[in-house]
């Protein structure tokens, strides 16, 4: 079982405010949270946003819907994760997720958490050796390992992207990858651009009204879901 920490901010350079853009009547981040709550392996969900004024409205909204929230540095996202872990008493297994993935797949997240546990590895993901669409990314590691990264990482890239200190030091942190048989690495199911959001809007419009718990297989069955970036 694991604690998920979902990182979110309003100041995206390519699509500002994307996490609060309306998706079938609710903010996109709330739609993603709905999906994450269907994960069998997650016992706790925390949103890590920044203490910058640009994220005040996001933090207020998260409070309104009852989400545990930690606010930390805007650019030092590793420091933000460390602050969330230390301030909110997170121990054991941690799952890193990002709030621009409203098609997040609970079964993929569960598979990665289980792979981490069963393999005994200190870091597990499905994004270094990518076979899943962008937007289904998940990383799993121990809270203690990330605290080590927080103490030792000095490279700005390591600080901004949270986990590179772990997977770039495989002599210290054993790593394992979750892969699938089909190669869908060219598909964009994430939201970084207006075009990405338009795709996700089409998916939700097609599936959510009749099946709000739609799966990745339901998305794959849509005739417009296989266009590569």
Image (cartoon, rainbow, N blue to C red):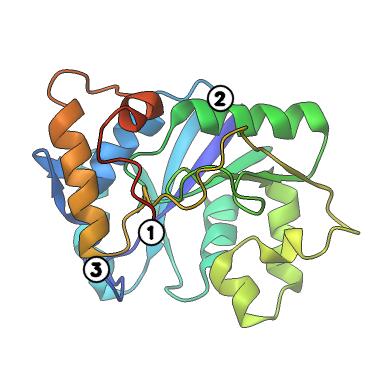
Q: How far across and down, in percent of the image, does residue 159 sit?
A: 60, 73
Q: How far across and down, in percent of the image, does residue 183 sit?
A: 56, 42
123 left or right, relative to 157? right
Q: For the residues labelled 2 and 1, say whether their Cβ atoms are less than 8 Å apart.
A: no
Q: In terms of secondary structure, where does tag 2 sit?
A: loop
Q: Which residue is mark 2?
A: 41
Separation (CA) of disc 3 from disc 1 = 17 Å
Q: Residues within 10 Å of mark 3 (few under 14, many from 20)?
A: some
- Numbered marks: total: 3
Write the residue at 18% across / 27% down: 208
Q: How far across and down, in percent of the image, does residue 113 sit?
A: 63, 32
Q: Which residue is mark 3?
A: 15
Where 20 falls versus 11 (above or below)?
Answer: above
Write the residue at 44% across / 44% down: 46
Give the number of the disc on residue 229: 1
Residue 14: name its quadrant.
bottom left
Q: In terms of secondary structure, where does tag 3 sit?
A: loop
> Which quadrant of the figure contains the C terminus?
bottom left
Separation (CA) of disc 3 from disc 2 = 31 Å
Where 139 falls versus 43 (above or below)?
Answer: below
Residue 13: name its quadrant.
bottom left
> Which quadrant of the figure contains the N terminus?
top right
For marks 2 and 1, the one nearer the N-term is 2
């Amino acid at each position: 079982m694991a604690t998920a920490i979902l990182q979110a901010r309003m100041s995206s350079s390519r699509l500002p405010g994307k996490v609060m853009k309306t998706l079938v009547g609710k903010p996109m981040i709330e739609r993603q949270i709905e999906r994450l709550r269907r994960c069998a392996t997650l016992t706790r969900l925390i949103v890590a946003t920044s203490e910058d004024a640009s994220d005040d409205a996001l933090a207020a909204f998260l409070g309104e819907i009852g989400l545990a929230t930690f606010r930390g540095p805007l650019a030092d996202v590793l420091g933000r994760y460390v602050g969330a872990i230390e301030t909110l008493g997170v121990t054991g297994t941690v799952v890193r997720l990002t709030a621009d993935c409203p098609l997040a797949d609970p079964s993929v997240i569960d598979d990665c958490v289980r792979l981490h546990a069963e393999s005994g590895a200190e870091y597990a993901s499905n994004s270094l050796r990518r076979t899943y669409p962008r937007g289904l990314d998940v990383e799993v590691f121990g809270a203690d390992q990330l605290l080590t990264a927080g103490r030792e990482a000095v490279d700005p890239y390591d600080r901004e992207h949270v986990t590179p200190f772990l997977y770039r030091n495989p002599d210290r942190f054993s790593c394992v990858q979750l892969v699938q048989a089909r190669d869908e690495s060219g598909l964009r199911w994430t939201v970084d651009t207006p075009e990405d959001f338009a795709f996700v809007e089409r998916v939700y419009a097609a599936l959510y009204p009749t099946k709000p718990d739609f799966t990745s297989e339901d998305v794959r069955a849509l005739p417009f879901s296989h266009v590569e970036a």
